[in-house]
């Protein structure tokens, strides 16, 4: 949907580059900077919207792109546009509210969310209720909250889920009042007064600024969150952590990892609700946290100081269990820990982990963007679009932004994206490998190749899903060859690999039920999801490489049995940034780093296949040395979550590596 002017709803007010090295045959010069005039509308508003949902029962009648003004929204700052906006959201019988089975594949971006017209004492002054799971994102949002004393406003409210990524957010307000220990107690039962009030299995948060809030971040529960580059200014408390719960019923914050933080004029940086008392009950890692006028760096409700503040930099400090070498017995640590070496290739000029905002090409004119459907591609889920897409890349790479209208584009042989290409999808456009070329498990072939081997330059991909139409046991879904010409010039944002579990994939409950009755050969989805080659570099932000364990379409619940050999393989010499990524349910491994170097990974999330060890790894894929496969000693029948071999300078800053099931039986949970 498109919002192009401020719009008023009943409780909230919403308002709304790069050099390339390769040139297509139509190009006389590189695209250069954007040429949009200051008052020009964003190109996405005026481009012809002809995208479709290829496998919808009525693809021509189902409207993918909706402009809220076409549903009656005025956007004049006066009219109540609530009903019009909801009508646009619900159009086409879309699910919403509490009636939606799916919490994946959601993105909200480019808003100012202003709750200052809501009465300060009302908890309805909440910017976003964000109860989501994987492949979700919040991007480029400013939250304007009440500045009144003792207000109940909050920017984000999230009570559960299994995310996810958010980045480039600003929170203003929530008020800064004299410190009162009851603030933390009140937070357990009545969230409010916060920049972020969050509880979720795992999440990655990058580049967030919180100004003048009572509590910048209240963490209710988690298994693991990574905060990268968080700025806290003039708040009362930076992080309030509910800790101490160690059972299923009482679980609270499990692990909080914070890197590259700047905290200014805030009395308390981090405060937990209960002391650790020498045992693991809420781990915490701080790295490169710069404090300015902060009295307490780490404390406990009641006033106990664990780590003094001041004006200083915390290089590396941890609270939790530390494992050393091959010793399986941890040592509880509460103090300074070894600071990992960070290769300069991973850092920006300020010494922080490099990051790059999701490209949206806001300064580019409509004339600088071309549509693939206007240039011969169909995207109807039936037509072979390989030749059409390759011709488009060969013609426009380097001098046009290439807009992939919503749809499913079938490719039946390797599609090569040249260096210099900048791609934007629409509502997660699908590029799907299909056909005989990808059926030979003994001779795997690449579906999409990002850059020719040894190529260098710009390559940006955003809002695309790479997938297959099975069975495709020989499909290497995405091969990444491109090397950056400058830091972060080669990457993906909000781009995912989704295998099976969706209409049109031929890998759904009907073909491959939970029982395994579909067999192996009919239910192969891929050989390898993502291969980052030795000469490549990659900035990958917000990617979910998911082999479906259940149907997304249909009832949204039915479990299925699919088989994909490998998740993410990196042999890159770096730099590689894997920020907010997940890889799930592949047979041999989820992440495999071999002869790699200079990687930053945080947070990474994995799940083993629910059916293992029946069939057991490596299944029909075998262990193949040429593909750098790990071994499975001593009858190990389940996939590796993360394996690192002959590699150096690999930084994993936050990980959730999960094995929930054995032959689809949930492992019993400890209740202590």
Image (cartoon, rainbow, N blue to C red):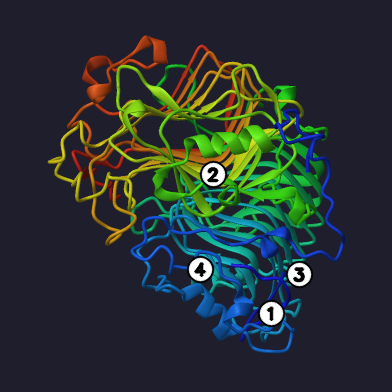
Quarter residue 115 falls in: bottom right
Which residue is denoted by mark 3 in the rendering?
176
Looking at marks 3 and 4 on the same chain, the residue that comes earlier in the sequence is marked by 3
The foreground one among 482 and 574 is 482
Which one is in front in this view, the residue at disc 1 or the one at disc 3? Answer: 1
Q: Secondary structure at mark 4?
A: helix
Separation of disc 2 and disc 3 at Cα?
A: 38 Å
Label 1 – label 3 distance at C-alpha? 28 Å
Residue 669 is situated, as x and y percent measured from the top left of the image, at 27, 47
Q: Nearer the viewer, residue 346 or 85?
A: 85
Q: Quadrant of the N terminus?
A: bottom right
Tell me which label, 1 or 3, sits earlier in the chain. Answer: 1
Number of other residues with Cα within 10 Å of mark 2, as a class: few under 14, some 14 to 19, many 20 or more: many
- Crowding at mark 1 (Cα within 10 Å: few <14, some 14-19, many 20+): many
- Left or right, 518 with reference to 258: left
Of the pair 461 and 613, the residue shown nearer to us? 461
Secondary element under disc 3, as helix, strand or loop, is loop
Task: Label 2, secondary structure: give it.
Answer: loop
- State whether residue 634 appears in this view: yes
The answer to whether residue 168 is left or right of residue 187 is right
Q: Is residue 402 left or right of residue 583?
A: right
Instruction: Give the mark nearest the N terminus, 4 or 1.
Output: 1
Q: Nearer the viewer, residue 458 or 580?
A: 458
Q: Are marks 2 and 3 in contact (CB under 8 Å)?
A: no
Q: Secondary structure at mark 1?
A: strand
């Amino acid at each position: 949907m498109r919002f192009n002017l401020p719009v008023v709803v009943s409780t909230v007010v919403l308002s709304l580059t790069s050099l390339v090295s390769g040139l297509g045959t139509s190009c006389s010069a590189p695209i250069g900077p954007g040429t949009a005039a200051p008052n020009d509308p964003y190109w996405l508003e005026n481009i012809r919207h002809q995208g479709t949902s290829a496998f919808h029962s009525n693809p021509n009648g189902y409207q993918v792109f909706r402009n809220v003004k076409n549903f009656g929204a005025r956007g004049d700052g006066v009219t109540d546009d609530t009903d019009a906006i909801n009508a646009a959201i619900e159009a086409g019988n879309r699910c919403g509210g509490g009636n939606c089975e799916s919490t994946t594949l959601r993105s909200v971006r480019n808003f100012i969310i202003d709750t200052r017209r809501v009465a300060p004492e009302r908890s309805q002054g909440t910017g976003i209720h964000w109860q989501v799971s994987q492949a979700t994102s919040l991007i480029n949002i400013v939250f304007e909250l009440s500045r009144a004393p003792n207000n109940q406003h909050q920017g984000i409210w999230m009570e559960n889920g299994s995310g996810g990524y958010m980045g480039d957010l600003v929170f203003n307000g929530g008020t800064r009042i004299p410190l009162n220990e009851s603030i933390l107690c009140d937070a357990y039962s009545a969230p409010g007064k916060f920049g972020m009030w969050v509880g979720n299995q795992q999440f990655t948060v990058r580049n967030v600024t919180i100004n003048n809030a009572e509590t910048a971040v209240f963490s209710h529960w988690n298994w693991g969150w990574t905060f990268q580059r968080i700025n806290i200014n003039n708040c009362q408390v930076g992080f309030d952590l509910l800790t101490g719960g160690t059972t299923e019923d009482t679980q609270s914050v499990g692990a909080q990892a914070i890197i590259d933080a700047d905290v200014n004029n805030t009395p308390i940086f981090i405060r937990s609700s209960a002391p650790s008392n020498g045992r693991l009950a809420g781990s915490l890692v701080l790295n490169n946290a710069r404090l300015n006028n902060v009295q307490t760096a780490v404390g406990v409700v009641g006033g106990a100081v664990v780590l003094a503040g001041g004006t200083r930099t915390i290089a590396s400090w941890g609270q939790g269990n530390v494992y050393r070498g091959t010793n399986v017995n941890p040592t509880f640590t509460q103090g300074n820990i070894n600071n990992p070496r960070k290769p300069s290739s991973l850092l920006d000029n300020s010494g922080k982990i490099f990051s790059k905002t999701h490209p949206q090409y806001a300064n580019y004119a409509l004339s600088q963007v071309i549509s693939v459907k206007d240039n011969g591609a169909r995207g109807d889920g039936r037509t072979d679009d390989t030749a059409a897409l390759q011709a488009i890349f060969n013609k426009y790479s380097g001098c046009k932004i290439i807009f992939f209208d919503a749809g499913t584009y079938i490719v039946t042989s390797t599609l090569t994206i040249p260096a210099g290409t900048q791609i934007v999808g629409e509502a997660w456009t699908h590029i799907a490998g299909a056909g005989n070329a990808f059926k030979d498990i003994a001779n795997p072939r690449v579906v999409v190749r990002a850059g020719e081997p040894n190529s260098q330059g710009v390559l940006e991909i955003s809002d695309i899903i790479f997938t297959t139409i099975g069975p495709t046991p020989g499909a290497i879904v995405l091969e990444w060859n491109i090397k950056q010409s400058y830091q972060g010039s080669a990457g993906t944002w909000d781009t995912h690999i989704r295998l099976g579990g969706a209409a049109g994939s031929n890998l759904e409950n009907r073909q491959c039920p939970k029982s395994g009755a579909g067999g192996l050969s009919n239910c192969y989805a891929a050989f390898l999801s993502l291969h980052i080659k030795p000469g490549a570099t990659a900035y990958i932000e917000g990617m979910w490489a998911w082999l479906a364990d259940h149907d997304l379409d249909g009832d949204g619940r039915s479990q299925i049995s699919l088989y994909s050999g490998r998740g993410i393989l990196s042999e890159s010499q770096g730099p590689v940034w894997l920020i907010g990524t997940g890889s799930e349910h592949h047979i041999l491994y989820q992440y495999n780093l071999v002869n790699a170097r200079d990687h930053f990974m945080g947070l990474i999330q994995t799940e083993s296949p629910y059916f293992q060890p029946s069939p057991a790894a490596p299944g029909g894929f075998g262990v193949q040395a040429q593909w750098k496969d790990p071994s499975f000693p001593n009858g190990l029948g389940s996939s590796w979550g993360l394996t690192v071999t002959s590699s150096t300078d690999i930084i994993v800053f936050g990980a959730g590596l999960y094995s929930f099931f054995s032959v689809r039986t949930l492992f019993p949970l400890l209740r202590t």
